[in-house]
Amino acid sequence: MQKINREALIEKAAALLDAGTVDRVLAWKRGEFDYDVTPGLFTTREQMEAELVFGDFCGANMSKYLIKETLKGEGKVLVFLKPCDTYSFNQLLTEHRFDREKVYAVGIPCEGMLSVTAIKAAAGDGISKIDVTEEGVVVETLFDGTKVFGHDEMLAERCRNCKSKRHVAYDELMGEEGEVLDSARFDEVAKIEAMSSEERFAFWQGELSRCIRCNACRDVCPACTCEKCVFGNPDSGIENKAITDSFEEKMFHIIRAFHVAGRCTDCGECSRVCPQQIPLHLLNRKFIKDANNLWGDYQAGEEVGSRAPLVDFDFDDMEPGEAVIKNGGEQ
Amino acid sequence: MQPYKPLIVAFCCNWCSYAGADLAGNNRLSYPADVKIIRVPCSCRVNPMFILRAFQRGADGVILCGCHPGDCHYTTGNYYTRRRMSLLFSMLDYLGIERERTRVEWVSAAEGAKFAATMNDFAETVAALGENKRLEDLRCKK
């Protein structure tokens, strides 16, 4: 259950709109069901009262929308940022992707977002309503009555391993400042590393072969902000929508993850939007884990202007052959 | 049926390793004809995609040769290569692709003998692994 509700967000946004500080608001908009919340743009109080929502399905990271939105007008855009969103916000500023002067950022607390996939898997078909109360996640279904699940069991994987409750960027903060957490987010990567080469290959073949190349992971990623994408190049041989060979998925996913290596803030949006539930964050985390392991801890987006590991070097860096072994490769 | 011969792609930097290969030839040192050299301006020109593309098109092993760290013609290019390839190779290993199929080696223009020895050793390693099955693109096979 979130500590802050939609009324508080609407009040805050309406006050800022009335004061003329901002002229539009980026927030979460009601979808067809309780759980399919989409990002939306609001300009009046009426619009917000009709459609703005905030709850346990507002996982969408608003930072990336600022790139296009700040180009549209002269006034400021109000954006609500959860702690993990603020890292992406800083990372985009580091890369000069939008004008900080045109944004008014309000930090809001987050108690972790729920995974729709987990709820659907547990509750079965015909979900008509999902409520989050003190006793847990109350799911009403058409065929099977009401079911109650524990809140923590239904948390999205990225929230169970939340890396930080601290806002690293904001103009104004609602609620209290949180702390950087000591999360076990690399445990699953380590588990895969511990498998044999054959098992790892089979695991990833199984996961990646479900990919339908919808490009949602790329489109939602706050680190993927190129105007022209390498995957849009008709000469690349991998621009096809339909996959004709298992190589294509591997190529796509290795390159996608590599292009954000060192810049990925581990917000987990890629896995959230994947319609095939491929654990894409495990690829990104592998890069983060390796980079931390080889060149010291680095958290992308922690401060504006920090130097990512791949655009930096040391004279006595490890050789790639040794590095693979240090990163958990087989002897 | 012909006996299996590995296909190896070697990305060699123009300033050191390519000249090293030249020296190996001048000195009549032999290295396997399975090694196909692609000249690049600097080892850091090699995009991770090049390596994957080589595998896609049927390479069984990919080796990247550049100037020794500190000797880069462009001062710092190979330091970046070193970091990038550390991550890429770790990722390939993570996905279950045999680690021995990829290698980075620093070969200077004066090291013709090292070039030949490296290529002989790498070709042997790759031949022992056999055909690249895990990163192949069936459409590229005849």
Image (cartoon, rainbow, N blue to C red):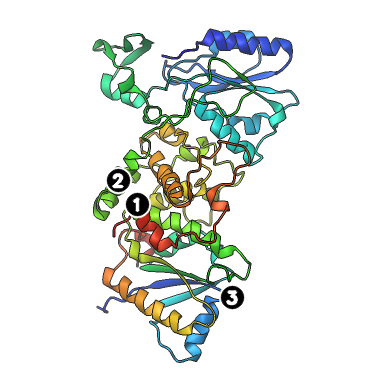
Quarter placement of the N terminus of chain A: top left
For disc 3, the chain is B
* Picture quadrant of residue A206: top left
Q: Nearer the viewer, residue A204 or A240?
A: A204
Q: Which residue is mark 2?
A: A192
Give the spatial CA distance, label 1 vs label 2: 8 Å
- Of A290 and A225, nearer the camera is A290
Marks 3/2 in contact by CB < 8 Å: the verdict is: no
On the picture, is B40 further left or further right than A135?
right
Which amino acid does the dot numbered 3 rest on? Trp
- SS under mark 1: helix
- Rate crowding at label 1 as few (under 14), some (14 to 19) or many (20 or more) other CA atoms within 10 Å: many
Task: Confirm whether circles 1 and 2 share one chain.
Answer: no
Query: Measured from the top left, where is residue A98 in percent x and y?
Result: 67, 35
Residue drawn at x 32%, y 16% is A127
Res. B65 in view: yes
What residue is shown at x 29% (from left), y 52% (from top)?
A201
Q: Which residue is mark 1?
A: B94
Image coords of residue B42 (percent x, y): 57, 68
* Mark 3 neighbour class, 10 Å CA radius: few under 14, some 14 to 19, many 20 or more: many
| Contact between labelled residues 2 and 1, with CB atoms less than 8 Å apart | yes
Q: Tell me if residue A64 can be seen.
A: no
Q: Which residue is mark 3?
A: B15
